[in-house]
Image (cartoon, helix red, strand yellow):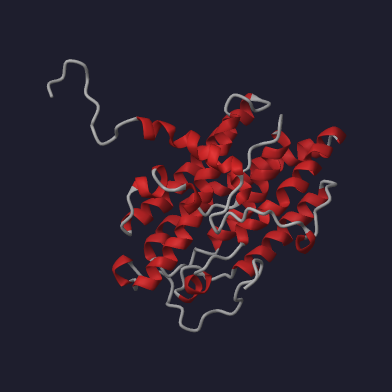
């Protein structure tokens, strides 16, 4: 199966929506569900980690607060999916803090560092990602896994605000010639990495056969392209042909990442590694 292709036909044996709970899963179904959940959670967590780098550096107080709220929402969404993984037997450390760097399966789009003075980079990135996230979440509304179905609505409602924020800034920046040139540079750089959101994993067929996600990655990718391409072109930007872009060497979904990812992971796990979380902290003077 190529990276942009996935089965488009509805699996004949897909169970009815929200018909499965944890105890109903076969071992093969649980492994497929874990792949889906890790992708969702890793994307959100790493995206949020990068967005926090804009705290106090955004061009206006309003945009600073807005992006901080977006990052907070994304951390919250990551928690929704990591919590489901913990219900399947993982610990939080296994999901995040002690997990090997090459076990993470987020798209390379979210791990990339921002360009110098890259507010344009941040806006293009959040727009490309948030449209993809809306499409991915909508494809889970009728998931066969009941605990997942219970959480999708909350995430979808919050993603709408994220897209509106990115679109308002796209319009504002595109009205200035210099800013539009920077937007174009961001599109050229980030578009190939945005395509990695829709790369299939090893268990894509099993994910759809179980009904965990009804839409194929190929159809979701087409919907994403049908949304972002005319929008960006409407702002005077040139979007690369998807099938002609140079595919990044790092794939993200298969555990291969850019060098910057390893630096980012070291940074956000540093405190956890240095603090002994197995021993509860005690106030001075408290008896042992």
Question: From where the camera sits, is residue 19 visible?
Answer: no
Q: Which quadrant is the N terminus positioned in?
A: bottom right
Instruction: Return the x and y of residue 105 as percentages of the image width and height.
Output: 52, 54
Q: Quadrant of residue 32?
A: bottom left
Which residue is more in the foreground, 1 or 283?
1
Q: Measuring from the top left, give residue 33's x and y in whole percent.
A: 43, 65
Residue furthest out toward the top: 285
Which residue appears farthest toward the left when viewing the image? Answer: 287
Left or right of residue 109: residue 238: right
Q: Residue at x 37, y 49 (%)?
A: 94
Q: In which quarter of the image is residue 285?
A: top left
Q: Is residue 14 left or right of residue 124?
A: left
Out of 255 and 151, give the one closest to the viewer. Answer: 255
* Quadrant of the rendering where the C terminus is positioned: top left
* Residue 124 vertical placement versus 39 (above, below): above
Name the residue at 37% across, 56% down: 85
Q: Locate residue 51 relative to residue 236 in the image: left or right.
A: left
269 with respect to 2 (left or right): left
Residue projecting furthest to the bottom: 12
Q: Name the residue: 49% across, 36% down.
A: 266
């Amino acid at each position: 199966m190529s990276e942009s292709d996935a089965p488009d036909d509805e699996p004949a044996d897909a169970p009815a929506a929200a018909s499965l709970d944890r105890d109903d899963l076969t071992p093969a179904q649980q492994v497929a569900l874990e792949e889906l959940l890790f992708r969702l959670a890793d994307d959100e967590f790493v995206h949020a980690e990068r967005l926090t780098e804009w705290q106090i550096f955004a061009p206006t107080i309003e945009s600073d607060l807005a992006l901080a709220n977006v990052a907070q929402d994304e951390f919250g969404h990551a928690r929704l999916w990591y919590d489901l993984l913990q219900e399947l037997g993982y610990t939080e450390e296994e999901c995040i803090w002690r997990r090997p760097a090459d076990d993470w399966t987020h798209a390379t789009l979210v791990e990339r560092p921002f360009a110098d003075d890259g507010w344009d980079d941040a806006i293009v990135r959040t727009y490309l990602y948030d449209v993809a996230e809306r499409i991915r979440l909508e494809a889970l509304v009728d998931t066969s896994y009941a605990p997942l179905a219970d959480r999708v609505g909350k995430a979808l409602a919050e993603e709408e605000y994220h897209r509106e924020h990115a679109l308002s800034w796209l319009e504002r920046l595109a009205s200035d010639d210099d800013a539009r040139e920077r937007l174009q540079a961001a599109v050229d750089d980030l578009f190939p990495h945005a395509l990695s959101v829709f790369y299939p994993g090893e268990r894509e067929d099993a994910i759809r056969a179980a009904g965990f996600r009804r839409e194929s990655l190929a159809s979701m990718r087409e919907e994403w392209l049908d949304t972002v391409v005319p929008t960006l072109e409407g702002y005077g930007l040139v979007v690369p042909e998807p099938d002609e872009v140079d595919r990044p060497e790092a794939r993200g979904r298969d555990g291969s990442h850019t060098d910057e990812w390893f630096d980012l992971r070291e940074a956000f796990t540093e405190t956890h590694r240095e603090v002994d979380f197995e021993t509860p902290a005690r106030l001075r003077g408290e008896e042992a």
